[in-house]
Image: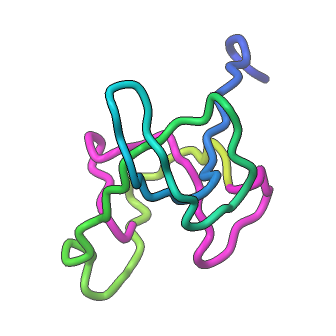
Amino acid sequence: MVAGPLVQLPAIATAGWVRIVAVDARSAIAEVVDACDGMRAGDFLTPTVWPDLSAMPPDGAPDYTGPAHVLFTLDSRRYTATGDYAVIDRGDNAGLTIGQ
């Protein structure tokens, strides 16, 4: 049973990778480097921030002491496997670290 109203979360997915090749005061031109899905008017860019992999636990062992809820997965799949991505409702302010 749900205790409150259902909340529709915005779907966020990677449509692709672009490289900005020109910029002026009102616009920018980007080259599509890799397309994962259709890019549409209203899509937005976020900067790529690569994780510091040196912070990963040396043994790669998962930590099951701090569970989180899976919000959604790529293409809304119900199952995931090694190498898949999932968005969860927990962040570094709750102790999440690379490799968990």
Q: Could you tell me which residue is drawn at 38 percent across and 48 percent down? A: 22
Whether the magenta-drawn stretch holds residue 7 is answered as: no
Q: Could you tell me which residue is drawn at 25 percent across and 86 percent down? A: 58
Relative depth, front residue between 91 and 35: 35
Q: Which residues are magenta?
A: 74-100
Residue 55, percent from left and from top: 20, 72
Relative depth, front residue between 77 and 40: 40
Is 62 above or below relative to 4? below
Whether the magenta-drawn stretch holds residue 95 is answered as: yes
Residue with the most extreme top position: 5
Q: In which image quadrant can residue 77 be found?
A: bottom right
Relative depth, front residue between 71 and 61: 71
Specify the quadrant that holds the N terminus. top right
Specify the quadrant that holds the C terminus. bottom left
Query: How many marks can you see?
Result: 0
Residue 9, percent from left and from top: 65, 27
Is 6 above or below relative to 51? above
